[in-house]
Amino acid sequence: MKQTVASLLVCALLAACTTGSNPFADNPETTDDGTGTGTDTGDGTGTDTGSGTTTIDTTVSVPTAIAGNVTGVTFDSANGTLTVEGVNLDDVPFTAVYRRAPALDQDGYLAFTVQEDPLDRHYTAYTRESTDGSVRATAVSSAGPRNRSLMGAHFERDGAYDPPEVTEDTGLVTYAGRYVAVTNVGDVNGSDLLPTPVTDPELLVPQALIIHGDAFINADFADNSVEGNIYNRELLDTNLNVISDLPSIVLVVTDIEANGSFEGTVEYDTRDPLSGTTTNTVIGSYAGVFGGTDASSVAGAVELDQFDGVDDNLGLETELESGVFVLDRCGTAGASPICGNVNPDVGSP
């Protein structure tokens, strides 16, 4: 992953503006079909040795490209605390407890920050748990200083994978809601930074800018495939004012694995003029997992190596984005209003 800070570029943009690991560890699910023994390798395949039980590994891991510098996250929704493992220089312990920053909350995603002193790195994190509590996801970023951004994302599920029961002709399900991301683009005048009398530009610490938008996921549990869109994307300053519109992106169709996880590539949406391209352009990757009864929720993360179009609409050449989506299935209690435009029944094509 590239780790170059774009804070100097964002200063020009702002001047133009007028204004853990999972504590509920999954256990392998064991079933006895009376015909043989074997183990699932995690990609939907297995081996039968002749007699006994078949074991399916339901544990969920975050791909390295998505995780970045984050090795684990624990979100305690009851107490409103977030603990992050792995990112460097965020706090004295390897496992750091972040502070709630409600002024930065976005569309149901809770904001947390940490900065030990005015000249230490500032970290911004966003986390959300699904309405049923089965899945959650978190994105974290320090936009600098010292020529490196430290960032990444994490998602997890409680319990085993429980897909909807479908027939060979049905099973198309929709999930919708909001998306939030952190970037390596920083502002040294950020709203959450500790005050400092230091003026030397080499020592000033930036606060990461964020991106928000809408997420839409279609999953076909009959043929185990998933794809989606993230659209209405906007880059925000640290006071949550809009700096600029951003190109829409697509989550390219990929397989749903036997444990309910998925991993695929991200491209600019060629129908969006802001993308600057009419050809399929891979700009990153995405991954996630389905959770809850009848896969009532989905959580996932996106890693982008660029986000302002192939023509660098904002003059950003080394920008990075780490985002998350936690969505409820259309037809459930927490579903997005856009679900009124789709058929929420699992059994409808």
Image (cartoon, rainbow, N blue to C red):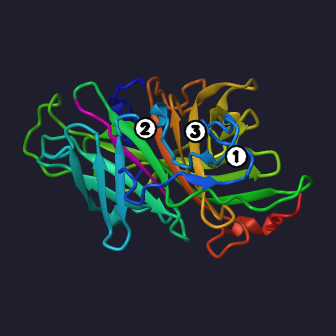
Identify the disc placed on residue 286.
3
The answer to whether residue 345 is left or right of residue 288 is right
> Residue at the location (50% across, 28% down)?
305
Residue 5 in sight: yes
Residue beneath disc 2: 67
* Alpha-carbon span between mark 3 and mark 2: 11 Å
Residue beneath disc 1: 228
Magenta span includes 146:
no
For the residue pair 270 and 258, the one nearer the viewer reads as: 258
Q: Which portion, as a residue range, is magenta?
A: 136-145
> Residue at the location (57% across, 41% down)?
287
For the residue pair 343 and 209, the one nearer the viewer reads as: 343
Image location of residue 227, percent across then percent down: 72, 44
Quarter of the image where the C terminus is located: bottom right
> Residue at the location (43% across, 55% down)?
25
Quarter of the image where the N terminus is located: top left
